[in-house]
Amino acid sequence: MTQTFDIAVIGATGTVGETIVQLLEEREFPVGQLHLLASIESAGSSVPYKGKNVRVREVADFDFKRARLAFFAGGDAATRSFAGRAHEAGCAVIDLSGSLPLNESPRVVPEINADLLAGLPKPVRVSCPSPAATAVALVLKPLLALLQLNRVNVTACLAVSTQGRAAIAELARQTTELLNVRPLEPQFFDRQVAFNLLAQVGKVDEQGHALLEKRLVSELRQLLELPDLKVSATCVQAPVFFGDSFSVALDTSASVDLAAVNAALEAADGLEWVESDDYPTAVGDAVGQDEVYIGRVRGGIDDPTAVNLWIASDNVRKGAALNAVQLAELLIKHYL
Amino acid sequence: MTQTFDIAVIGATGTVGETIVQLLEEREFPVGQLHLLASIESAGSSVPYKGKNVRVREVADFDFKRARLAFFAGGDAATRSFAGRAHEAGCAVIDLSGSLPLNESPRVVPEINADLLAGLPKPVRVSCPSPAATAVALVLKPLLALLQLNRVNVTACLAVSTQGRAAIAELARQTTELLNVRPLEPQFFDRQVAFNLLAQVGKVDEQGHALLEKRLVSELRQLLELPDLKVSATCVQAPVFFGDSFSVALDTSASVDLAAVNAALEAADGLEWVESDDYPTAVGDAVGQDEVYIGRVRGGIDDPTAVNLWIASDNVRKGAALNAVQLAELLIKHYL
């Protein structure tokens, strides 16, 4: 008989939490008991799993001794309140909120740095990087042997689903009102996001950097093992429901062999490379797929040391839920 | 009695052409005869000017000796076919298509390089830069005395109006079909642009660069008088009707004094500077305004030699029609 593992999913009613449950089923993860958990507001609802509706219970009441592994997909507050309790109860923690410090819970993307899992103290704590860091790191990793990077410039155009269900509903509502020429009353966002781009996602610090921008820089450095990498990061809110897009410009210190760059990207794990006579888009290609899409690979204009790239990724799937489930698969095989 | 000037507007039925006519009225330009011209498909329609509907005639039939100054807002083909004829007839040409070479028809933005007009041979030929080059150059110009630029990285998220009325109608149609859960049948664009971002605007050359990207680089170099400036340019099609947004990362060779950068931007002509506790958007701020909006001015993360900026601009107005009318105002005062 195959060994099974009792699993907890915190934030089970959110877009990422629901996708984790769906992927556990799709990928035939050996789930024993499945404990779906959420804050008191969402407790009582249910989430489909293997043809049944599994009831969601309040996380505050849960005894983490009853789970071998917990996915924290419920945002910063839930992770800060309950990840420590899970850890003390001996439960492995896979965090998706980014609120655990890098030195306590390293960021791991299986295709990039799965080897880190071997060195983790038990009970294991490990984090998924932000969707942006995951996508960009998957593209940069196979290029590190080819390029001497001076600076990575990233403009990330993020889907509203980055900010959860309320943001998705707001984009739909704003769009409908504008198309019907009704007055716009912003609710979730503080201004018009439909048919517009917002220069900033969330609040910024005194230096003007948003949390997601700081995460992108620190997580890229850790994933690529380049602690001094210069990264210029701008995270923009696009009027897109699902799927992130990234415009990336690499500044390197020598002439770039673009054929070698293309070959390395085409061969890399976790990437779908698109030829230069076409290009990928978030919605048309990446959403619903396990791979991160890479296209528009080109040099600079009169500038042989530059490389320009376009990346499209499913922010909920490979950007979060899929990476988390892949980490869980590695943990139960080797490290739990 | 005030002197008046007979004016021709080619492409008078397009978004930019109509805005030129509207601005001639708003700014009380001393128009004598107003000749509205278009291709045979659009001839016969009319455009409002000073409370009357002015009939649009076919450009092929027009005798350019009848105009002192012609705005070419009808796209590449119209400019290539008729700008030469206008020039030979002694008519000053203000081109907005970008199809006249830089050495024949220099790009001028009044706030940046109006002095170039004095040296032009007559009849004058002068071009508006692309909306992207205009917006980015207006922001970079006041910084040149403060920064030693190594490279300018631009991701331009362009409105569909960049591609004319058919593109505007297509975004509205696609959005409506998706909201009504009807199957999407792309027409003007070759794929879904609603709730999506397209990595590329128009076709690309063998090196993978789109025409608008090449214009951005060459026009920035000419406007800023920095012929060797390294510019990394990516032009993206955003699901936005009007208003371009630009994420710009500057790589410089010394520590940047951000207070001085902010002060220079706040003081510059043609710019509206937004403090770091807020940010401008294309639709919410720039559209309908004469100024280019600049915000999110910040350094790099752990990187004192970087500057990050966000620019929002009305692509039809300051990006095209307003700049053209401002050029005409200077020409009739000093150089016609």
Image: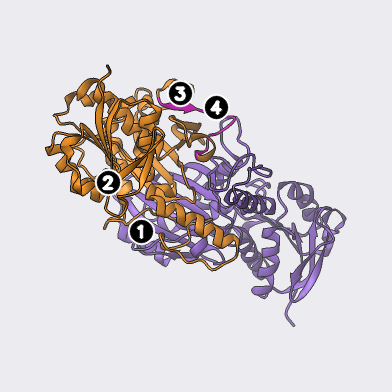
Chain colours: A purple, B orange
> What's drawn in magenta, residue-wise?
B270-282
In the rendered structure, which amino acid carries the disc numbered 3?
Asp
Per the model, the C-alpha gap separating discs 4 and 1 is: 40 Å
Q: Horizontal and vertical percent for residue A285?
A: 49, 64
Q: Horizontal and vertical percent for residue B63?
A: 17, 41
Subunit of label 2: B
**Residue drawn where x is 82% and y is 59% of the image:** A64
4 vs 3, front mark = 4
In the rendered structure, which amino acid carries the disc numbered 1?
Val
Marks 2 & 4 on one chain:
yes
3 vs 2, front mark = 2
Marks 4 & 3 on one chain:
yes
Q: Is residue A210 above or below residue B78?
A: above
> Is any atom of residue B36 visible in this view?
yes
Task: Pick whichever, B20 or B138, lies toward us.
Answer: B20
| Label 3 crowd (10 A; few <14 / some 14-19 / many >=20) | some
Q: Are marks 1 and 2 in contact (CB under 8 Å)?
A: no
Marks 4 & 1 on one chain:
no
| Label 1 crowd (10 A; few <14 / some 14-19 / many >=20) | some
Q: Is residue B257 left or right of residue A298?
A: right
- Is tag 3's residue or tag 2's residue first in the polypeptide sequence? 2
**Residue drawn where x is 83% and y is 64% of the image:** A66
Per the model, the C-alpha gap separating discs 1 and 2 is: 53 Å
- Is tag 4's residue or tag 3's residue first in the polypeptide sequence? 3
Q: Which residue is mark 3?
A: B257
Q: Horizontal and vertical percent for residue B171?
A: 48, 55
What is the number of the mark on residue B275?
A: 4
Subunit of label 1: A
Per the model, the C-alpha gap separating discs 3 and 2 is: 55 Å
Q: Which residue is mark 2?
A: B57
